[in-house]
Image: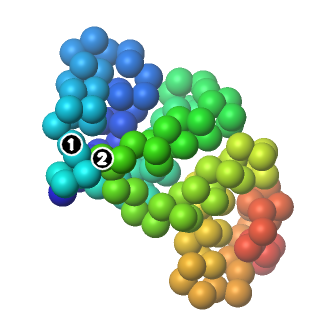
Amino acid sequence: MIGLDTNILVRYLVQDDARQSQTATRIIESELSVDNPGFVSVVVMAETAWVLERAYGLAAAEIASAIERMLQVEALVVEDEQQVFAAMTALAEGAGSFADALIAALGEKAGCRHTLTFDRKAARLAGFVLA
């Protein structure tokens, strides 16, 4: 298994740099496989969502679609895939940010009754309670 950094996923998704995008595509589509997968951590998924929103101005639905594409690549192992999927779904439904939804989903997986926050927007998500 080979770990992948955020910039590899971003270049693969947005195809905005000819050389790096070509390399990222070759890695993901040709060099990785089910037997030799790429590992994508939850941190990389959260950073990717953040970069797509802040640097590229993608809307929530577009980011959710990009995350869904990553989840469908058989040659990728996504850490806490079910929680990433739940966060992607919340993002697609407009329930909150991907990072906040991921925090709530990971907290639930860890057995938390809820996650305390000062963030009123995050508090709209299931699993969060205003402190």
Three-letter code for the amino acid on which mark 2 is drawn? Ala
Number of on-image labels:
2
Q: Residue at x 60, y 87 (%)?
A: 111
Residue position marked by numbered label 1 in the rendering: 32
Q: Are marks 2 and 1 in contact (CB under 8 Å)?
A: yes
Please say if 16 is above or below 72: above
Query: Callout 2: helix, strand or loop?
Result: loop
Q: Residue 56: give x, y in percent of width and height.
A: 53, 24
Asked if residue 24 shows in the view, the reply is no
Asked if residue 54 shows in the view, the reply is yes
Query: Callout 1: helix, strand or loop?
Result: loop
Q: Residues within 10 Å of mark 2 (few under 14, many from 20)?
A: many
Left or right, 18 with reference to 71: left
Q: Residue at x 39, y 43 (%)?
A: 73
Left or right, 103 with reference to 128: left
Pick the residue in front: 92 or 76.
76
Q: Residue at x 52, y 42 (%)?
A: 67
Q: Point out the image quarter for the C terminus.
A: bottom right
Mark drawn on residue 123 = none
Q: Residue 36: give x, y in percent of width and height.
A: 17, 52
Q: Residue 126: give x, y in percent of width and height.
A: 78, 68
Three-letter code for the amino acid on which mark 1 is drawn? Leu
Please say if 49 is above or below 110: above
Residue 39: quarter of image: bottom left
Q: Residue 89: give x, y in percent of width and height.
A: 68, 51
Residue position marked by numbered label 2 in the rendering: 75
- Tell me which label, 2 or 1, sits earlier in the chain: 1
User: How many angstroms separate mark 2 from mark 1 (CA)?
Assistant: 6 Å
Pick the residue in front: 29 or 21.
29
